[in-house]
Image: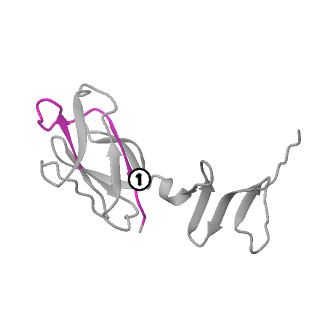
Amino acid sequence: MSTVVLDTITGKSTATTITIGSTPVVSASANSMTIRGEGSAQTSIQQGLAKHFILQENAGSNTTHNSFNNSSVDDHATGVIEPKFTTNMANANSLVTGGIASGVHNGAVMAPASGGSDAVYDVATTGYYITIRGITSQSLLDSERYPVSVFGDLA
């Protein structure tokens, strides 16, 4: 077996693919890169990356434990927070996903919500609201830790 150790790989000026054996596995064009998935399917690398994530706590404190592309978190009321992006999204059609990570509220559910206490999905280019509610009581409550990720296009 051979080992190749490099600091720089320089391709032809028109090279747009990386091929292993006879199979092209990475293709590139202006502002787009795809990688070969299962079979002959191609997956967009940019579309598959999280553009924002946060591990937040608001039970007793409003603490951010880890984040990416997060400028601040506004704590509006019990169980209602608004994370804001450092770099905005291109539109309000982003996917917000997350859940309750730990703590006394394992019987809770996190949902994207509008600025109030209703459970309407509300994502802006600058951030989003989420609410945390008890599963049975449906009352708003603070949670010890919850992770959230956002997928979509950056502005």
Which amino acid type is shown beneath numbered disc 1? His
Secondary structure beneath dot 1 equals strand
Q: Position of residue 135 (x, y in %)?
A: 18, 31
| Residue 59 visible to an observer of this rendering | no
Q: How has the structure been colored for display?
A: one colour
The C terminus - image quarter: bottom left
Residue at position x 11%, y 36% from top?
139
Vertically, is 155 above or below 64?
Answer: below
Residue 131 part of the magenta-drawn span: yes
Residue 4, horizontal then vertical, whole percent: 84, 48
Q: Is residue 11 left or right of residue 111?
A: right
Q: Residue furthest top?
A: 104
Which of the image's four quarters has the N terminus?
top right
Give the residue drawn at x 32%, y 53%. 72
On screen, residue 110 versus residue 147, left or right, reads left
- Give the quarter of the image for residue 7: bottom right
141 vs 23, left or right, is left
Label 1: few (<14), some (14–19) or many (≥20) C-alpha neighbours in 10 Å: many
Please, is residue 111 above or below residue 12 in the view? above
- Residue 153 is situated, as x and y percent measured from the top left of the image, at 42, 63
129 sits to left or right of 20: left
Q: Which residues are magenta?
A: 130-154
The answer, for residue 72, to whether it is visible in the render is yes
Circle 1 residue: 52
Q: Is residue 51 inside the magenta stretch?
A: no
**Across the whole image, how many numbered discs are drawn on residues?**
1
| Residue at the extreme right of the image, as rendered | 2
